[in-house]
């Protein structure tokens, strides 16, 4: 009789901590899934027939989770050779040549490719933004470009 009681004490002594360990692990996993910042609930994908018999106050988030991929899943695999990408074709813009600048009290003018332009005036594919004494700022396709007065050549 005493050996049976001793066996029961041993079983209780070793199984109770194991049970608490399992319960603690399950609670930890449950809380980690519940409070994970990358989890979202997607209740629209659950068929409506399943949800119709449940009370509306029931929260289904722990049972149906969509998780975003972890950060390491977005990193390129170092063992995969990426496909060689073609360099984008650069469209050649016509060369602009500044040959003359005229600045007086009334106007600021410049000659670009043989045609006179006032400050602020638009050309075929550019706009004159600023005319200085030795240089002109033009805007082409949203980017600024300086033209400098060339020497006689």
Image (cartoon, rainbow, N blue to C red):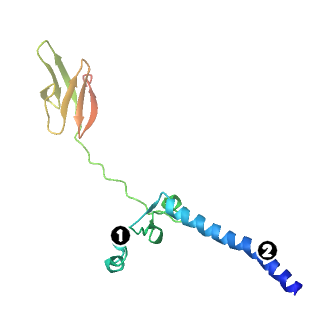
Please tell me whether residue 64 is drawn above or below residue 133 in the rendered image. Answer: below
Q: Which element carries disc 2, helix, strand or loop?
A: helix
Q: Is residue 31 left or right of residue 122?
A: right
Please tell me whether residue 87 is drawn above or below residue 82 in the rendered image. Answer: above
Q: In this view, does 108 lie to the left or right of 132?
A: left
Q: Which element carries disc 1, helix, strand or loop?
A: loop
Q: Observer-nearest residue: 68 or 14?
A: 14
* Farthest residue, direction top: 105
In the rendered image, which quarter contains the N terminus? Answer: bottom right
Q: Where is residue 109 in the image (x, y as percent from the top left)?
A: 15, 22
Q: Which mark is residue 56?
A: 1
Please tell me whether residue 42 is drawn above or below residue 116 in the rendered image. Answer: below
What residue lies at 13% left-to-right and 27% top-to-bottom?
117
Q: Observer-nearest residue: 7 or 21?
A: 7
Q: Observer-nearest residue: 51 or 43?
A: 51
Q: Can residue 75 be seen by looking at this rendering? A: no
Q: Name the residue under label 2.
A: 13
Q: Observer-nearest residue: 115 or 19?
A: 19
Disc 1 crowd, CA 10 A, few/some/many (<14, 14-19, 20+): few
Please tell me whether residue 149 is drawn above or below residue 94 in the rendered image. Answer: above
Q: Is residue 63 left or right of residue 107?
A: right
What residue lies at 36% left-to-right and 79% top-to-bottom?
50
Q: Where is residue 101 in the image (x, y as percent from the top left)?
A: 19, 20
* Farthest residue, direction bottom: 1
């Amino acid at each position: 009789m005493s050996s049976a009681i001793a066996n029961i004490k041993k079983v209780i002594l070793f199984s109770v901590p194991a049970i608490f360990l399992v319960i603690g692990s399950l609670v930890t996993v449950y809380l980690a899934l519940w409070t994970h910042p990358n989890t979202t609930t997607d209740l629209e994908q659950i068929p409506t027939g399943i949800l119709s018999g449940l009370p509306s106050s029931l929260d289904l988030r722990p049972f149906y989770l969509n998780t975003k991929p972890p950060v390491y899943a977005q990193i390129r695999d170092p063992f995969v050779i990426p496909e060689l990408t073609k360099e984008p074709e650069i469209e050649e813009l016509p060369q602009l040549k500044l040959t003359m600048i005229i600045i007086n009290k009334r106007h600021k003018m410049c000659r670009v490719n043989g045609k006179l332009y006032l400050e602020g005036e638009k050309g075929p594919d550019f706009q004159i933004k600023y005319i200085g004494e030795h240089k002109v700022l033009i805007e082409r396709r949203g980017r600024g470009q300086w033209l400098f007065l060339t020497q006689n050549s």
